[in-house]
Image (cartoon, grey):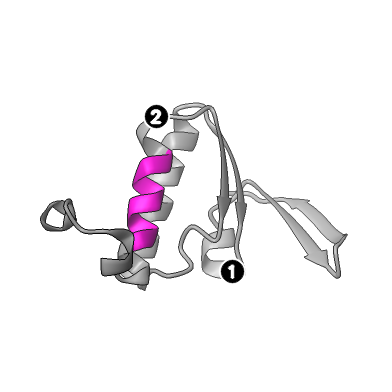
Amino acid sequence: GMVHRAKHYPSQLSGGQQQRVAVARALAGKPSILLADEPTGNLDSKNGEAVMGLLGELHREGATICMVTHDPRFAGHAQRIVNLFDGRIVEDSAVRN
């Protein structure tokens, strides 16, 4: 957990810690739509999977999640994948999970 860092300023946290705090803040209000730009970008694989688990739980509760990632492991969690190249859609496919 991050409880021991509750009184720290963002500049006193590592990039991964800042990322985890940002994800926690985004999920705290149980949003119906979540835009996530590289939510696992600064995280190790264990914390990245934990974040994906939380996003999956939010989706199962009915939220729509639009996530940007460069990591195919995390893209595989999606129901739909849209690939862009130079700002244009080059592939749009449904995924069977």
Residue 20 placement: quadrant: bottom left
Residue 22 located within the stretch drawn in magenta: yes
Q: In the image, residue 83 lies at what x, y percent?
A: 77, 62
Q: Residue at x 30, y 63 (%)?
A: 17
Name the N-terminal-most of marks 1 and 2. 2
* CB contact under 8 Å: marks 1 and 2: no
Task: Specify start and end residues of the magenta stretch as a single range.
Answer: 18-26
Which residue position is annotated with label 2?
29
Q: Evaluate whether residue 3 shows in this view.
A: yes
Disc 2 element: loop
Placement of the N terminus among the 4 image quadrants = bottom left
Q: In the image, residue 35 lies at what x, y percent?
A: 59, 44
Figure disc tally: 2
Front residue of 12/51: it is 12
Q: Is residue 44 left or right of residue 64?
A: left
Report the residue that reaches farthest toward the left: 4
Which of discs 1 and 2 lies nearer the camera? The answer is: 2
Which residue position is annotated with label 1?
72
Q: Evaluate whether residue 1 shows in this view.
A: no
Q: In the image, residue 81 lies at what x, y percent?
A: 70, 54
Q: Residue at x 35, y 68 (%)?
A: 16
Residue 79 versus residue 30 in the image, above or below: below
Q: Is residue 2 left or right of residue 83?
A: left
Q: Is residue 77 left or right of residue 95?
A: left
Q: Main secondary structure of the magenta part?
A: helix
Residue 70 placement: quadrant: bottom right
